[in-house]
Amino acid sequence: MKIILYNQKNNGYRQGFKNYKNSDIEIFQVEWSNKFLGEEINMEQKRDYANFDCKRCGCDSYAACSDGDELAIGQSLKINESSDLSDIIKFNNGGCVYSISLIKNPSFSLWGYEYEIEVMAQGPSGLGTGSGYLRFTDKTGDAYSLSITDSSKKKHVVDYKSSDPEITRVEWSNHSF
């Protein structure tokens, strides 16, 4: 159980936890801050990433969650414990993916898309080199695709709706799915 102790004189607060042990209260962590005066902070924070496993990095491969470590809302993706995906998710002629995140869709959608996969990537460079293709599978088994054609590094998005939006698998290829 969390407790917040306010200190008006210093315009800050002390934060601690109660641990019930033989009916006594024990505070085992105390921090001072004036940044969040008057606001409660949830100390039980979820990790900011999910880690997927990939057996074969490079072109035309996939990564999947292990042990229920799905990509949840507010998380970024790591593959094989790496947050820089550019050496793992590759397309032909220098195309690659740098990062993948899942967020709640920040804009209003006429079609009711509640979730957004943000992908920082660049497509293959050079005339006639094609595109890089990604496919994301959520917990319901539905799949959502993205084609990356622009050879400059920029953000790409996939908006979708789902009853169980966590991503369990990411596939990539030089050919359309």
Image: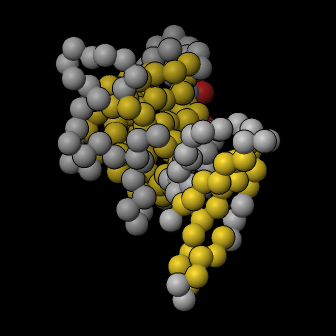
Q: Residue 84 versus residue 43: which sits nearer the camera?
A: 43
Coordinates of residue 54 in the picture (x, y in percent): 48, 55
Residue 72 in the figure: left or right of residue 8: left
List the single residue furthest toward the right: 10
List the single residue furthest toward the bottom: 22
Q: Which residue: 32% across, 25% down?
A: 159
| 6 shown above or below 44 | above
Q: Which residue: 41% across, 41% down?
A: 73
Give the number of marks.
0
Coordinates of residue 24 in the picture (x, y in percent): 58, 82
Coordinates of residue 4 in the picture (x, y in percent): 60, 54
List the single residue furthest toward the front: 9
Q: Which residue: 56% across, 19% down?
A: 154
Residue 58 is at least partly visible in this image: no
Coordinates of residue 139 in the picture (x, y in percent): 26, 50
Q: Which residue: 60% across, 39% down?
A: 38
Q: Quadrant of residue 113?
A: top left
Q: Quadrant of residue 36?
A: top right
Q: Residue 135 versus residue 47: which sits nearer the camera?
A: 47
Q: Residue 63 versus residue 159: which sits nearer the camera?
A: 159
